[in-house]
Image: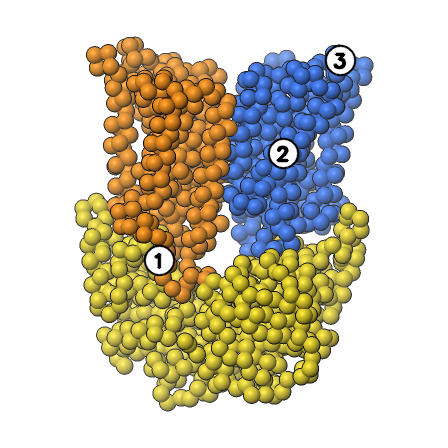
Chain colours: A orange, B blue, C yellow
């Protein structure tokens, strides 16, 4: 699927310094053209929705955008790592529901302390992520297929654990409701989207991890040229697995964010959410063919997704149309990525 | 073992398919044995159960036959389940709310599937998008369009006794206390046609060859994009046909669903010996694979377990079968 | 030359069906450049892969710095000081130059990678080598030559004691090769042991101290370069005289009609303003060094890659070839240099591969006429002497030479009048080779015309009626076989602007 760069082809004889004054500007290059475009699109979208709908201009809209952003951002950060290795994790949407169901089940029916429920939620993500990683790196399965099977398994598992019943996490005012304040704090009547702080902190941490740590460097290297990375003495399987473990971990965190924002979830749900997260990552400049991607881009891309999700109903477009629009956005984003790679190869 | 492999009949059918048939029979015997032990007063061996399992296999079979063509090219189609639902919703809506004639609605049903096939095919073959992400996006489109058309309402197709109810005979015609399995006849007919297309026509030859080595086929002067698109169109069309068998079995269709069937159809296909890397496909294998999935489903229900087990088992089956295929290919090279 | 640093003795390695290395010896001293020579498929690369632990050996010993060693992977070999500069560039296009050089052993500052320090270290390395490359540049934006320099810098930064260059000059320009040689001499003076794999005789004479020659997976001998002539080395490489004397005059009549005319063909930087004519019944040889743009010309002509401009005339008619389909319709067939990737369809049978390009004529209504298909395929199996148990055999089970014959059969079944043979005998054993030569002669005798791209000089001189020489994407010479000599071809092949 991925052509090894620069081995053959017409540009091999001379420097490939193409582009114009804008794209070669050092500041533009440091930030990335795509991210600048995304920010402009994001601002344009916000202006558009604000102009079209008075409701969009309200503070509560910001809060609801944030509610979407939290879990999508976590899923997006996680799946970015998989995408950078040249793989993908399709189990994150269903997984998020499954882990939240298991955690909520422990709290509601087994009556464990909330903290145990939270830990179990994250632990489930870690376990599923590890299995995904091993199936891909050791079993040699195509990532989309391996994680699709995991998606099936998790869908069944979530339903089996709760016996098919929906689960509601403790409300904000309930004795165990402190989890909700982690993401949305009530300060004298005004709700403060505290969760955004966590998203920012984790985004910065994971960005440093991706760009400045060895595992991060190797994850990029695997996506760029797996064989060359292996020949450099890097244990490719370990770092490939790690990408899926990170994805699993962040899916666990997303499960917490989701249950905090929306409280209840039904078994078997969550399918399709992975496409919002993957779409966000690709819009943010992460390549489907691996090697390239940034956390900041993913966060921006995810914002576009959540603004769409919040804004569309407010200008009178029903939920059904949203699926269609997001499907189209996804196709366009992937198509742009394909074109970008064609130009590069 | 070698002797069995060399047997003329076994060779004709294919060793793997013989094994698969044995698995199916064993599975049936297993369920027959276990069901009474797990659930009191339940029995697996009955004509009704058999018919019920088969009815599940009809629509799933058409989905699976279709996706076999796509997988043969080395691609994948995750939109078939939702497309089936979308087709059933749109045509059912036209039938019940708009009063279109049944025959026309059935045609629309198939054409909706064809339309999605064209969309997927063009995006994959001509625009060069990865098939899994393309088909997942069109899965969202299918779900969305289905819901929009019916305004998020479920659609109930007419019952057999109603006017326009004759389409239900497509899965089975009541005959006294029993039922004549029309669906089985039609499914086998469909499979035979698919097998002929795959093995005897230019389309099938090129579809398989593209899955094996696309570039070599292109350099032989073959319009690979066109044949690859055709695989998706066949797949979509068969998903549209599957919708007819789905409503004939269930009558009621809910919007926003269908993705679970993708996986079952793909599972049936890979179990039957179609390689996920493309180039190798077997329609007969797909047929047996689908029957096994249907049998599993019926067995789980018969034992009184929740259907959720089905998801887990299907997921595991795909993993294991694909892993075995990868291993045998690696050994060969 | 100093002490022996590395000895490989009696190295033996078999793959299923192939005896790749047959008790090969190699000895490298400190401060020498040791050439490893042999034709394609002689086992040079395999030997190096055994040395660096990519393959495990079946037999033999490797002694390095006085101790017997066996490396389990390239990393272990690197750590011990044996590094390889690959023929295929092993670069990570998305990372920067410095990140590439230090991949797998990043300079750390606590838990974080110190990219600043790595950039400085890389800059120092480049200074030392006298190369001008920005360590912060993204790897994929460099030229191939510069990427190669980065690989060398990477090798040196490993504190290597033995460096293996696997055909390093293949994609380099003259100036870059000069730079490369300067670096290699520097390294030699620093008492490193250098193994230099190449098939360019001139380079061997210029840069190396000793030559070890391999042939068909076996060890032939070792010579001191300055005491031996080109002919000595060539004789060892070819061993027996397997080729006839060069063709002395064209077998094509002067007034034979032009079947294919290409004018001012441009496609990327590897095909620049190429024009030539092909006459009926002619074998037109395309010669040149690796990366001269011959395959690219063929692919652009065939419509496999997009072309920017240029006119193509078939039998005097101007044709518009945009895709391989168009080319095939014009009666052009293309036999690719890379059979596995571009030639055969592995999961299909001999018969099915044979009819791949002409399935329309095997249709009986909607269905494929398998009987006719098998019959025609069988006919070509017989004419081409393809060794296969039957036409229903999967091509994957055939040997390289026989796979090649199946690909040839594909174009003969199509009845193409113009055939492009791109390295038709690469990776094929000697016996099958002469069969393919004979076949080509039969084809032109029947009135077909062949463009033959070949990197083997003997093949070019033996088969061609006329020779087009390319260098860096341009046609730099056109010789009639009567006036062609190895020297004149070589001269044109290195003719730069």
Left or right placement of residue A118 versus residue C432 in this view = left
x then y, percent, for residue A239: 35, 45
Assess disc 2: are there few (<14), some (14-19) or many (≥20) residues with their C-alpha within 10 Å of its C-alpha: some
State the residue lying farthest toward the top: A174
Q: Please state which of the two labelled residues, at mark 2 or mark 1, is closer to the viewer.
A: 1
Q: Where does label 2 land, which residue?
A: B115
Taking depth in this image into account, of B174 and B35 the one nearest to the observer is: B174
Question: Which residue sits at x=74%, y=28%?
Answer: B184
Q: Residue at x 68, y 60 (%)?
A: C329
Q: Is residue A100 left or right of residue B100?
A: left
Residue that lies at the very extreme toward the front in this rendered image:
A51
Q: Chain of mark 3?
A: B
The answer for how far apart the CA atoms under marks 3 and 2 are is 29 Å
Q: Which residue is mark 1?
A: A17
Q: Quadrant of residue C119?
A: bottom left
Mark 1 to mark 3 CA distance (whole Å): 71 Å
B90, above or below C446, in the image: above
Image coordinates for residue A283, horizontal then vertical, percent: 40, 38
- Work out whether residue A108 or residue C295 is closer to the camera in this orientation and state it: C295
Q: Nearer the viewer, residue C153 or A282?
A: A282
* Nearer the camera: disc 1 or disc 3: 1
Q: Do the dots labelled 2 and 1 sit on one chain? A: no
Q: Can you say whether B41 is above or below A281 in the image?
A: above
- Pinpoint the chain carrying mark 2: B
Identify residue for label 3. B163
Q: Quadrant of residue C5?
A: bottom left
Q: Do circles 1 and 3 both sit on a common chain?
A: no
Chain under label 1? A
Label 3 crowd bin: few (<14), some (14–19), many (20+), radius 10 Å: few
How crowded is the residue under tag 1: few (<14 C-alpha within 10 Å), some, or many (20+)? Answer: few
Residue C19: percent from the left, percent from the top?
52, 68
* Residue at 72% over, 31% down: B187
């Amino acid at each position: 699927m991925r052509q090894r760069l620069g081995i053959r082809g017409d540009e091999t004889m001379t420097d490939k310094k193409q582009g114009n004054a804008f794209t070669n500007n050092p500041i533009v290059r440091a930030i990335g053209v795509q991210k600048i475009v995304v920010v402009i699109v994001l601002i344009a979208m916000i202006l558009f929705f604000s102009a079209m709908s008075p409701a969009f201009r309200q503070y509560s809209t910001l809060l609801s955008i944030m509610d979407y952003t939290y879990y999508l951002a976590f899923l997006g950060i996680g799946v970015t790592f998989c995408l950078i290795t040249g793989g993908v994790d399709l189990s994150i949407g269903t997984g998020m529901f499954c882990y939240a169901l298991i955690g909520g089940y422990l709290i509601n029916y087994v009556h464990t302390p909330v903290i145990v429920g939270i830990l179990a939620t994250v632990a489930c993500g870690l376990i599923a992520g590890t299995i995904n990683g091993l199936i891909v790196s050791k079993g040699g399965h195509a990532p989309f297929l391996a994680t699709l099977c995991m998606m099936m398994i998790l869908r069944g598992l979530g339903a089996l654990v709760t016996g098919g019943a929906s689960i509601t996490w403790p409300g904000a005012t309930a004795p165990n409701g402190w989890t909700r304040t982690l993401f949305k704090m009530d300060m004298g009547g005004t709700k403060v989207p505290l969760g955004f702080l966590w998203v920012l902190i984790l985004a910065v941490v994971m960005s440093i991890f991706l760009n400045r740590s060895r595992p991060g460097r190797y994850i990029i290297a695997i996506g760029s040229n797996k064989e060359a990375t292996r020949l450099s003495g890097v244990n490719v399987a370990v770092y490939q697995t790690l990408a899926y473990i990170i994805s699993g971990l962040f899916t666990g965190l997303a499960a917490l964010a989701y249950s905090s924002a929306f409280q209840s979830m039904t078994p078997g749900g969550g399918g399709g959410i992975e496409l919002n997260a993957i779409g966000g990552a690709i819009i943010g400049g992460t390549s489907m063919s691996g090697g390239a991607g940034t956390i900041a881009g993913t966060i921006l891309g995810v914002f576009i997704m959540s603004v769409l999700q919040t804004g569309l109903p407010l200008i009178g477009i029903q939920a059904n149309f949203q699926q269609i629009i997001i499907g189209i956005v996804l196709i366009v984003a992937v198509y742009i990525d394909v074109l970008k790679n064609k130009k590069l190869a | 073992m070698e002797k069995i492999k060399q047997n003329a009949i076994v060779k004709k059918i294919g060793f793997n398919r013989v094994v698969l048939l044995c698995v199916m029979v064993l599975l049936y015997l297993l369920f027959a044995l276990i069901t009474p032990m797990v659930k009191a007063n339940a029995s697996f061996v009955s004509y009704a159960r058999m018919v019920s399992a088969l009815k599940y296999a009809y629509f799933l079979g058409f989905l699976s036959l279709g996706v076999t063509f796509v997988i043969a090219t080395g691609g994948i189609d995750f939109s078939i389940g939702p497309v089936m639902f979308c087709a059933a919703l749109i045509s059912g809506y036209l039938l019940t709310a708009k009063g279109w004639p049944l025959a026309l609605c059935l045609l629309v049903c198939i054409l909706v599937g064809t339309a999605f096939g064209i969309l997927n095919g063009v995006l994959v073959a001509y625009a060069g998008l990865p098939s899994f992400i393309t088909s997942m996006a069109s899965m969202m489109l299918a779900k969305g369009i289905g819901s929009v058309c019916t305004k998020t309402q479920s659609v109930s197709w007419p019952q057999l006794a109603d006017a326009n109810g004759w389409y239900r005979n497509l899965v089975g015609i009541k005959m006294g206390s029993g039922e004549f399995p029309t669906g089985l006849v039609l499914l086998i007919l469909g499979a035979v046609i698919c097998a002929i297309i795959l093995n005897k026509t230019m389309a099938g030859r090129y579809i398989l060859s593209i899955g094996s080595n696309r570039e070599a086929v292109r350099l032989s002067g073959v319009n690979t994009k066109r044949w690859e698109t055709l695989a998706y169109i066949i797949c979509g069309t068969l998903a549209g046909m599957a919708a007819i068998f789905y409503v004939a079995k269930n009558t009621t269709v809910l919007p926003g669903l269908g993705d679970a069937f993708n996986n079952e159809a793909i599972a049936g296909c890979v179990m039957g010996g179609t390689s996920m890397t493309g180039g190798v496909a077997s329609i007969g294998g797909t047929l047996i694979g689908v029957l096994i999935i249907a049998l599993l489903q019926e067995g789980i229900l018969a034992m009184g377990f929740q259907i959720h087990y089905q998801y887990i088992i299907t997921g595991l089956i795909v993993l294991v079968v694909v892993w075995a295929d990868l291993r045998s290919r690696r050994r060969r090279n | 030359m100093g002490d022996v640093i590395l000895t490989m003795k009696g190295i033996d390695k078999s793959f299923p069906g192939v005896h790749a290395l047959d008790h090969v010896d190699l000895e490298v001293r400190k401060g020498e450049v040791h050439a490893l020579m042999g034709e394609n498929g002689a086992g040079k690369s395999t030997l190096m892969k055994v040395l660096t632990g990519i393959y495990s050996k079946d037999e033999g010993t490797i002694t390095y710095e006085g101790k017997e060693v066996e490396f389990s992977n390239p990393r272990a070999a690197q750590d011990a000081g044996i590094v390889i500069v690959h023929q295929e560039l092993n670069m990570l296009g998305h990372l920067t130059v410095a990140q590439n050089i230090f991949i797998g052993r990043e300079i750390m500052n606590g838990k974080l990678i110190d990219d600043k320090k790595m950039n400085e270290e890389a800059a120092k390395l480049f200074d030392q080598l006298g190369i001008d490359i920005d360590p912060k540049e993204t790897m994929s934006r460099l030229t191939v030559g510069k990427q190669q320099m980065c690989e060398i810098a990477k090798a040196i930064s490993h504190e290597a004691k033995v460096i293996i260059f696997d055909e390093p000059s293949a994609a380099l320009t003259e100036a870059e090769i000069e730079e490369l040689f300067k670096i290699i001499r520097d390294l030699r003076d620093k008492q490193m042991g250098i193994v230099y794999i190449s098939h360019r005789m001139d380079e061997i004479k210029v840069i190396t101290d000793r030559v070890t020659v391999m042939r068909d997976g076996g060890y032939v001998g070792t010579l001191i370069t300055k005491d031996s002539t080109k002919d000595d080395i060539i004789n060892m490489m070819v061993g027996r005289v397997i080729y006839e004397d060069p063709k002395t005059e064209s077998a094509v009549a002067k007034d034979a009609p032009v079947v294919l005319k290409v004018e001012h063909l441009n496609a990327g930087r590897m095909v620049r303003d190429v024009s030539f004519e092909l006459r009926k019944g002619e074998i037109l040889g395309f010669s040149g060094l690796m990366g001269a743009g011959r395959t690219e010309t063929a692919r652009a002509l065939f419509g496999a890659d997009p072309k920017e401009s240029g006119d193509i005339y078939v039998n005097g008619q101007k044709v518009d070839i945009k895709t391989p389909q168009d080319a095939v319709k014009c009666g052009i067939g293309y036999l690719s240099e890379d059979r596995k990737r571009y030639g055969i369809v592995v999961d299909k049978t001999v018969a099915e591969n044979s009819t791949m390009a002409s399935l329309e004529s095997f249709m009986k209504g909607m269905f494929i006429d398998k009987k006719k298909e098998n019959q025609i395929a069988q006919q070509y199996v017989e004419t081409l002497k393809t060794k296969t148990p039957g036409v229903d055999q999967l091509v994957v089970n055939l040997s390289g030479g026989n796979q090649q014959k199946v690909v040839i059969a594909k174009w003969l079944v199509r009845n193409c009048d113009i055939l492009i043979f791109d390295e038709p005998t690469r990776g094929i054993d000697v016996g099958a080779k002469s069969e393919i030569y004979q076949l080509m002669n039969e084809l032109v005798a029947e009135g077909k015309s062949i463009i033959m791209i070949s990197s083997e000089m003997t093949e070019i001189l033996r088969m061609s009626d006329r020779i087009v020489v390319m260098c860096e994407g341009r046609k730099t010479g056109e010789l009639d076989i009567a006036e062609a000599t190895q020297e004149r071809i070589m001269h044109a092949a290195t003719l730069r602007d």
